[in-house]
Amino acid sequence: MSEKNIDAREEPLCRIRDIYRAISDFEVEFADRYGVKLNEGMLLCSLKTMGQCSSGRIAELLGLSLSNASKVILSAEKKGLVERIVGKEDKRQMLFLLTEEGKKCIESIKCESNAMLELISKIKEI
């Protein structure tokens, strides 16, 4: 079926599919370029902006479930980008912050890069 023959009622769903594909392609390129997955990059960006955060706050910032946020944090920890510390006021609380390697990594990611601007432009066109 050619794109011109798509029923008008299906068009929004097809547009969402195209957006998903554009983001998926971007994620692959992002991981290849920076050595971190997109969620890990967003974690680093959030910690750079917010400073130390709890896993619950990170989940909220990234729009992830606690379980998925924990996976992203663990992956970033294994790469040496994030470290956990015990809360000063509540010793049961774990807080997360950037390591020096994490700071270097987020600095190397150019949020104003052409690839990100191209993705935004492509999504706007869809």
Image (cartoon, rainbow, N blue to C red):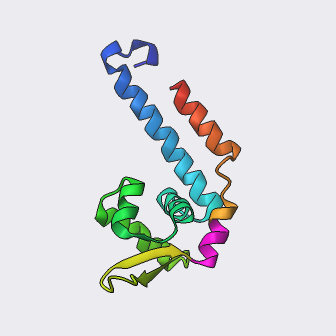
- Judging depth in this view, the residue of 4 and 34 nearest the camera is 34
Q: Which residue is drawn at 46% across and 35% down?
A: 19
In screen coordinates, is 40 left or right of 100?
Answer: left
What secondary structure characterizes most of the magenta part? helix
Q: In which quarter of the image is residue 56?
A: bottom left
Q: Residue at x 64, y 67 (%)?
A: 105
Look at the image and give the residue range highlighted in magenta.
99-105
The number of discs equals 0
In screen coordinates, is 93 left or right of 95?
Answer: left
Q: Where is residue 12 in the image (x, y as percent from the top left)?
A: 36, 23
Q: Position of residue 65 (x, y in %)?
A: 30, 59
Q: Residue furthest front?
A: 89
The correct choice, above or below, for 92 with respect to 6 in the image is below
Indicate whether residue 104 is drawn in magenta: yes
Q: Where is residue 83 in the image (x, y as percent from the top left)?
A: 49, 80
In screen coordinates, is 80 left or right of 91?
Answer: right
Q: Which residue is drawn at 42% across and 67% down?
A: 72
Q: Position of residue 87 (x, y in %)?
A: 39, 82
The correct choice, above or below, for 37 with respect to 100 in the image is above
- Judging depth in this view, the residue of 47 and 120 nearest the camera is 47
Q: Which residue is drawn at 63% across and 70% down?
A: 103
Indicate whether residue 55 is drawn in magenta: no
- Could you tell me which quadrant the N terminus lies in? top left
The correct choice, above or below, for 113 with respect to 47 in the image is above
- Judging depth in this view, the residue of 51 and 15 nearest the camera is 51
